[in-house]
Image (cartoon, rainbow, N blue to C red):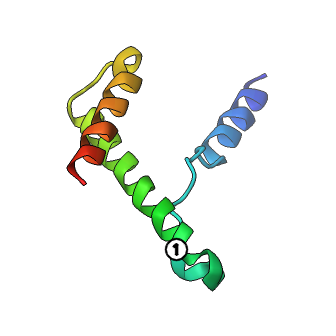
Amino acid sequence: MKTIIFIAAIALLATAPARSQGLVDPNKVAPEYREAAEKRRAEQMRQRECALKADLDKVLPRDRTAYLNHCLETLAARQ
């Protein structure tokens, strides 16, 4: 029994954590899609900035979506 628990613990520690979608690299896409990739990367950077602000402000999970939406709207209004 201890062996099974030990093997299960090792298996859990060896697995990689789930990650969100990586940043788009405009230099790795075909030239005709580069402009769209640059826009997507800019949007991803804004989303990450707002997520970092939410983490720093210790926003509760139940309030996180509203906080992120407000933050993204504020950033869009500045541009």
Q: Is residue 33 above or below residue 75?
A: below
Q: Is residue 47 above or below residue 59?
A: below
Q: Nearer the viewer, residue 19 or 9?
A: 19
Answer yes or no: is residue 25 visible.
Answer: no
Element type at mark 1: helix
Q: Where's residue 6, x and y in %?
A: 69, 33
- Find disc 1 in the rendering and name its residue: 35
Q: Where's residue 60, x and y in %?
A: 33, 18
Left or right relative to 72: residue 6: right
Answer yes or no: is residue 75 visible.
Answer: yes
Q: Residue drawn 39% across and 20% down?
A: 61
Left or right relative to 3: residue 38: left
Left or right relative to 42: residue 13: right
Q: Residue drawn 38% across and 56% down?
A: 45
Q: Is residue 59 above or below residue 8?
A: above
Q: Residue drawn 44% across and 54% down?
A: 44
Left or right relative to 45: residue 75: left
Q: Is residue 1 above or below residue 43?
A: above
Q: How many marks?
A: 1
**Quarter of the image holding residue 57?**
top left
Q: Quadrant of the C terminus?
A: bottom left
Q: Residue furthest top?
A: 62
**Quarter of the image holding residue 33?**
bottom right
Q: Residue drawn 28% across and 23% down?
A: 59
Q: Nearer the viewer, residue 58 or 66?
A: 66
Kind of residue indicated by mark 1: Glu
Q: Where's residue 12, x and y in %?
A: 65, 38
Q: Where's residue 54, x and y in %?
A: 28, 33
Q: Residues within 10 Å of mark 1 (few under 14, many from 20)?
A: few
